[in-house]
Amino acid sequence: MIKVGIVGGTGYTGVELLRLLAPHPHVELTAITSRKEDGMPVADMFPSLRGRVSLAFSTPEKARLTECDVVFFATPHGVAMAQAPALLAAGVKIIDLAADFRLQDPALFEKWYAMPHSCPDILKEAVYGLPEINREAIKRARVIGLPGCYPTSMQLGYAPLLAQGKPMVNEAALIADCKSGVSGAGRKAEVGGLLAEAADNFKAYAVNGHRHLPETIQGLEAIAGRQIGLTFVPHLVPMIRGIHSTLYATILPEARDTDFQALYEHHFRDDFFVDVMPAGSHPETRSVRASNMLRIAVHRPGGGDLLVILVVEDNLVKGAAGQGVQCMNILFGLDETAGLMHIPVMP
Amino acid sequence: MIKVGIVGGTGYTGVELLRLLAPHPHVELTAITSRKEDGMPVADMFPSLRGRVSLAFSTPEKARLTECDVVFFATPHGVAMAQAPALLAAGVKIIDLAADFRLQDPALFEKWYAMPHSCPDILKEAVYGLPEINREAIKRARVIGLPGCYPTSMQLGYAPLLAQGKPMVNEAALIADCKSGVSGAGRKAEVGGLLAEAADNFKAYAVNGHRHLPETIQGLEAIAGRQIGLTFVPHLVPMIRGIHSTLYATILPEARDTDFQALYEHHFRDDFFVDVMPAGSHPETRSVRASNMLRIAVHRPGGGDLLVILVVEDNLVKGAAGQGVQCMNILFGLDETAGLMHIPVMP
Amino acid sequence: MIKVGIVGGTGYTGVELLRLLAPHPHVELTAITSRKEDGMPVADMFPSLRGRVSLAFSTPEKARLTECDVVFFATPHGVAMAQAPALLAAGVKIIDLAADFRLQDPALFEKWYAMPHSCPDILKEAVYGLPEINREAIKRARVIGLPGCYPTSMQLGYAPLLAQGKPMVNEAALIADCKSGVSGAGRKAEVGGLLAEAADNFKAYAVNGHRHLPETIQGLEAIAGRQIGLTFVPHLVPMIRGIHSTLYATILPEARDTDFQALYEHHFRDDFFVDVMPAGSHPETRSVRASNMLRIAVHRPGGGDLLVILVVEDNLVKGAAGQGVQCMNILFGLDETAGLMHIPVMP
Amino acid sequence: MIKVGIVGGTGYTGVELLRLLAPHPHVELTAITSRKEDGMPVADMFPSLRGRVSLAFSTPEKARLTECDVVFFATPHGVAMAQAPALLAAGVKIIDLAADFRLQDPALFEKWYAMPHSCPDILKEAVYGLPEINREAIKRARVIGLPGCYPTSMQLGYAPLLAQGKPMVNEAALIADCKSGVSGAGRKAEVGGLLAEAADNFKAYAVNGHRHLPETIQGLEAIAGRQIGLTFVPHLVPMIRGIHSTLYATILPEARDTDFQALYEHHFRDDFFVDVMPAGSHPETRSVRASNMLRIAVHRPGGGDLLVILVVEDNLVKGAAGQGVQCMNILFGLDETAGLMHIPVMP
């Protein structure tokens, strides 16, 4: 059994990790920390876990995380990098759901997250935890920085187009119009997230710059091996879970004869959690609700030169906790799908 | 024109007052206070008011409320009673949407609101602002304490039964099972009100005691002129606006032959904002959305001895701001419906 | 492996059965029928099942249901009783999610469902599939009539009070104020169920008589061994899944000293799927979402004589498909929790 | 008083017309037709109108529409063109909320609506009812074809860019990523519109071709006086009302120095119902809920060459019934805002 610790289990990605890890056949949950809730049984805060998780929150001091095999950080940005050196020294693997180990360039991290990076050396060896792109590197990682929820959908959605030897689309002018359920904002007391504010409403936000932009550009450039240009416009949907990314790319004249449907199907043929739907499909976010699946449909409206790629995922699963468990499975040599075979909840 | 000031316009009842008062034909909005937002145009906080309300928030000091004819308090409990003496001394009428002037007994106020009442003398003369019950007293009031949202629905729902010379139902064992949209909790940053927490969910709360209980009992006893006993169970509905109260009362043997439908229709025959629906109806909260209407249906399932009264209102209109405007209309000798003829928004 | 057939898999209880049964460790899904969708892969209608269910719908004729060990009916009322004789003759067990085998009295069935019962003999031997009440009988059943969604919550909520040797509450005047998500109405094209009609709205319906009333009275009387009287008022909540029943019962003078919390905990001490929460709790429907759990909290507001029992369940799981699988497990001697250990999805 | 008839008042645009027209100061509602609901009081179908609309539905025969000054068609496509000749002959003005008089080319109409156009002569004189573009023509119209809900937002959103003497953006490659609430699909009994299907869900639809595409291209080309190319991707949002269109356009090198904020503000300086918000704004659909306002914000992320225009409207008001009333006001020489000064309902 893999001994797992969770730092910061009071947010949505934390409780989602518990939902996935508690019944995981190869995991023993050994500690969950929250300085503020020290002593409180996890199931008192989250009654959905009554009878299934007997752990109580404890302070990091009491939690003896160094005895774990792997520690997940479901914390605000900055926490994982503070605790990483000690854990690594003790031989503990780290999987961070926050942004500490996503951006390879410490200066870029500092620019977007308004704090200096405290351990650039560890950052250098950190592996970006997107299994469908980085599976081999994940196997050997000590520190995994999990992608953000939006970046997962954008990178997997564009990957087959960019991963070719030469450009197929105008890579300087990609447009990602993305829509997320409100759980993406986390379990934070903020007026903007109230049901009375966010329900029966729709809006864009952060049009002039969102933290997931530099991360996605870094990822897309790594896939392409070329510079890319991306406009990313996030929107807030009055729903709890789910991301729907509508991706636009202009086909280059030399690629007009490509069978893009076949290209996508071939690209993901060995990726269990990526489902390329039949041509003409319109994936719905609920078709992946509470599961680790990501579904993609490829459109070329009117047979023209604009590709429209539709991508759906559950932001808390494939976009966060599920992807973390998937990486853990790979890291420890388990079947990649272990503990992740949930059928989406529909309706 | 009536010069109107609003203290505390940054919450839901405040912005609803603005929606109703800005186009009111006899009102001139002269001041709106918020210490925290001093100088900010109201329409910057609430874009729905762009082009319609040109006021900016100002501190109470700058707002010169003593020059108003009437001041509405859309504030937390305790604010209105602190400012009431000075306003009354200046001849300003007061309409309080909070609880400062609801409970006639200062000890009861202190028990439920955990603060002493600072002006019990003013409290003594305050009028409970439920026009369908207290219309005459409202005409002559200097201070009006508006009912809470739940209490409005419960009192109007039970009134025809209790307002008779002798009891028709078991007045010692009334049960009110009430359901409210989330705007009733106000525009406060709290985890429990997040869309990700409250959507696709239903729960009861405060089963062992809610502040609207003593107020409702006081009101029902005033209507009946007798002691009554009430169990009140509030629930939270994943919707923005609306209250649905399901009221139960056991018919006494001597009242079994009553035509309750006729009783209700007769009782409210002169009340424009109370609509007694045809027998067998199931009023929906959306049938009063964004309007000052309250609709009632009377049921007697299986012809038995239990009456089931269904009551719907918009908690922010008839349950708060609209009722305040209705009281203002009465207070200043206007038509009771002035500025309140909004047709409900459906769908 | 148990060979399972499903008749009528195109509705919500049908797709929920598939979600639960496809990964069930002891089940082999062998047939699913729909005359209308003959030949269509199930996963084409429900993309949530892509890659997980490879069956296609077929006509009953092709489906060879007589080769199954058990057949679930997720059909409109009347279908199961038509096919029951042939299946029983072939030695197939039947679990009906509709109402054909709920009401023991054929006359009562005809009154509420407007059709004569076609096989009263089979009805006579049918077992009411509520494991926490009928576990022993279920073990030996050939035909199981599963309870309706509301009746499950009402019966389990009242059971500890009624199952005593003598009455503890006024059993002639029980009141059940119940609230259900819209999936309870099924996957039927009806204007009233449209999001534009049902969202941001709340209403009661069928106050003068709902089909779940006679079934619940029959069940409660079986538990008590005495006549009972019940008023049942259903309401529609703008959410997808979940039932919240608020149950009222007046404590008899001789039972005033009872520790009701202890009574409930003791009563359900051996029932895995019933969770009696700590005193003072307010269970939320989302705390059981997509799981087979049912949670109960016992309240006595103000220490008075009225008990208020709060019950939550997922109407499609414990209120339908999950309960069916639980009965199947019992029927075939499996662990009662096999394939039903889903942790509720929260948020 | 203008005598107004409504054909087809049982859908969402019909009931919205009633909400707007019943209190309109210059309108007398004289007839509303529905063959199916002949004799039923409108307020029985829509309780929100109780006490405010006393009309009953009647058959077209009884309705004496030829005595009206203007008739609104809130009907399926094809109805208005069938009745138009007789009404015009009687001197009645026609405002059609369906598509009969939108597409100037009868062949295009037939292609997208699968029926021949029955009165191409009338079509030739019909005026496209978008006041901010066509105000002068509307004044003199006999027949007005109101724009669709999506096309209104796209045309007004792109108009300032296209209405210049020479191109400012790449007009061959416009992208409109649009999101609509579910009331846009109408009050039709369809499984896809059920709350249990559409809530907590997000999806694109009709990516390969939507009826609003040819209409929008026709309108944009009329504004520009040049050919344009548009990709239009509609999405369904789990909310009742509202459209949010995110419009993309690539700035041409020669237009890089344009102050687009000033361009938009200037363009709409005389249009009461179009609100160009301050630079950096993110308009929300609820900021226009139940009102005739349309709000626009202009973004240029990172100062690059891609313009992102955000547009919100209420699909049932500015996108349908409100726009119809606005056209009626213009047609009859009234103030354009008569009966349309509703402040948006927020929250």
Image (cartoon, coloured by chain):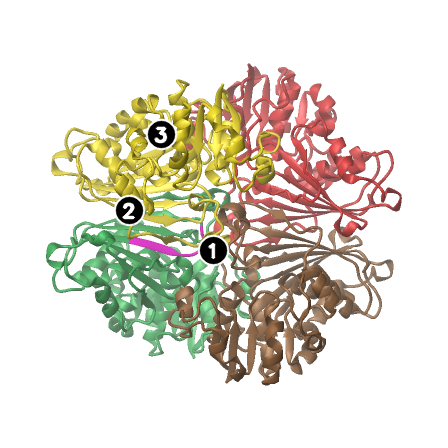
Chain colours: A brown, B yellow, C green, D red
Is A342 above or below relative to D246? below
Name the residue carrying label 1. B191
Mark nearest the camera among 1 and 2 is 2
Q: Residue D149, percent across and down? A: 64, 38
Q: Nearer the viewer, residue B30 or D266?
A: B30
| Identity, as a three-letter code, of the amino acid under mark 1 | Val
Report the disc number at residue B144.
Answer: 3
Task: Tell me the residue at 58%/51% (across/down).
Answer: A237
In the image as oriented, which residue stretches furthest toward the left? C254
Mark 3 falls within which chain?
B
Whether residue A292 appears in this view of the structure is no
Q: Secondary structure at mark 3?
A: strand
Q: Secondary structure at mark 1?
A: helix
- Name the side, left or right, on which B32 lies relative to B253: right
Name the residue carrying label 2. B111
Q: Which portion, as a residue range, is magenta?
A: C239-246
